Amino acid sequence: MMKHGWLIYSRTDIKQNKSYINWFIEEANSQNLSLELIVRDELTIGIINNKRSIYLKNKKIKPPDYAIIRTIEPLLNLHLEACGIRVFNNSYIARICNDKALTHHYMLDFDIPMVNTVFFKKHTMPLTSPLSYPCIIKETTGKGGMQVYYIKDKHNWQNQMESLSTSDFIVQSCDVQLGKDIRVFVVGKEIIGAVMRYSTSDFRANYKLGGSVSLYNLTKQDADMIEKIISHFDFGMVGIDFLIGKNGELLFNEIEDVVGSRTLSVVSNLNILQTYVTHIKSELRKRDIN
C-alpha cells in the first residue's frame, strides 16, 4: 500500500514556496509515495481526553505514515512522533538545530572548530561585549540571516541591547572573512553538495538578502569534518553552514533544519529532493521491517 505523508508549511510560507512544494509532491509521487500539503495554521495538536490528538480543520484525523515539517516548531515534531508518525527532520534535530547556542554546545563535543561564542539571556547581557569589537550578536532562534547584528563598539552594543526583542542570544567573534560562508547540503548520511555564498555589500552572505552564490568544492579535510558531524545525528535533510577563517579554514556556524535548496539549484543540476524522497522511502521501509 502506498505510504501517505504530510508536507507541513505555514500559510505565509506556502505563498513564496509554491514551486518548491509542487516539486516535492511530484517527486514523492514519482517514487510511489503520496504527499499532501497541510497548512500548519489548520492543524491543532494537544491532549484531548487524556490522549495526544491531532485535528485538521477542527476535525480529528487519521495520522499519516510520515510528515515532512517545513516550519520551525520542535514541539510539533515531537507531538507527531508521539502519535506514531515518522517525522523528517525528527524532533531531536529540530530542537538542537533551531537553537544556535545549543548547536554550538553540541558541536564542541565533536571537536568541530568554531569562532569564540558566548551565550546570554537578555536580562544577563553585560554593559559591554565580553569579546573584542567588532563582534556579532545573533538571536538563537533567528533564521535566514535575520536577527543578526554587527556590533562596532560599546555605544553600538548598548543601543542594540535596547532594541532586542527576544530573550536568548549568542555573541560571536567576527575574526573571519565577513560576507562569505559555505553551506553544505546533507541528506541522511550523504553530503550532496556545497555552495559558497558571498556578498560585497553586507557582512551576511545569505542569498535571500541579495548575496551571490557559486558551487564550492570541499577538500578532504572539510569532508572529514562534516562526516564527523553527520555521524552523530539522524538527519533527514539539512544545511550545515560554515564561516571562513582568515586562512581559508572552515569554522562551524549553524545547522539549518528547515533548509531550502534554491542556491544548490542555481549552480548545479543536482536534484536534492529526489535524493531526499529516496531517503524518506528507505527510512519508512526500515521502520516496516523493524
Image (tube, rainbow, N blue to C red):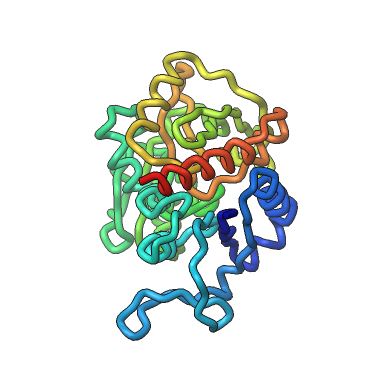
**Number of dots carrying numbers:** 0
Q: Residue furthest top?
A: 220
| Closest to the observer, 153 or 141 | 141
The residue positioned 42% from the left and 15% from the top of the image is 221
Classify residue 113 as left or right of residue 11: left
User: Which residue is at the front of the view, 163 or 240?
Assistant: 240
**Which residue is located at x 59 percent, y 62 percent?**
9
**Residue 70 in sight from this viewpoint:** yes
Q: Percent x, y for residue 205?
A: 59, 37
Q: Is residue 189 above or below residue 223?
A: below
Furthest-bottom residue in view?
49
* 208 vs 1, nearest the viewer: 1
**Vertical order, 184 against 159 (above or below):** above
The percent position of residue 4, horizontal first and vertical second, equals 57, 58
Quadrant of residue 37 in the image?
Answer: bottom right
Q: Measuring 28% from the left and 27% from the top, which residue is drawn there?
A: 111
Of residues 213 and 235, which is closer to you in this image? 235
Query: Farthest residue in the front direction?
Result: 1
Is the N terminus in the top left, top right, bottom left or bottom right quadrant? bottom right
Q: Is residue 209 something one can see in this rendering?
A: no
Q: Which residue appears at 56% of the width and 58% of the height?
A: 5
Q: Position of residue 151 (x, y in %)?
A: 45, 45
Looking at the picture, how far across and down is residue 33, in whole percent?
Answer: 61, 50
The answer to whether 110 appears left or right of 202 in the picture is left
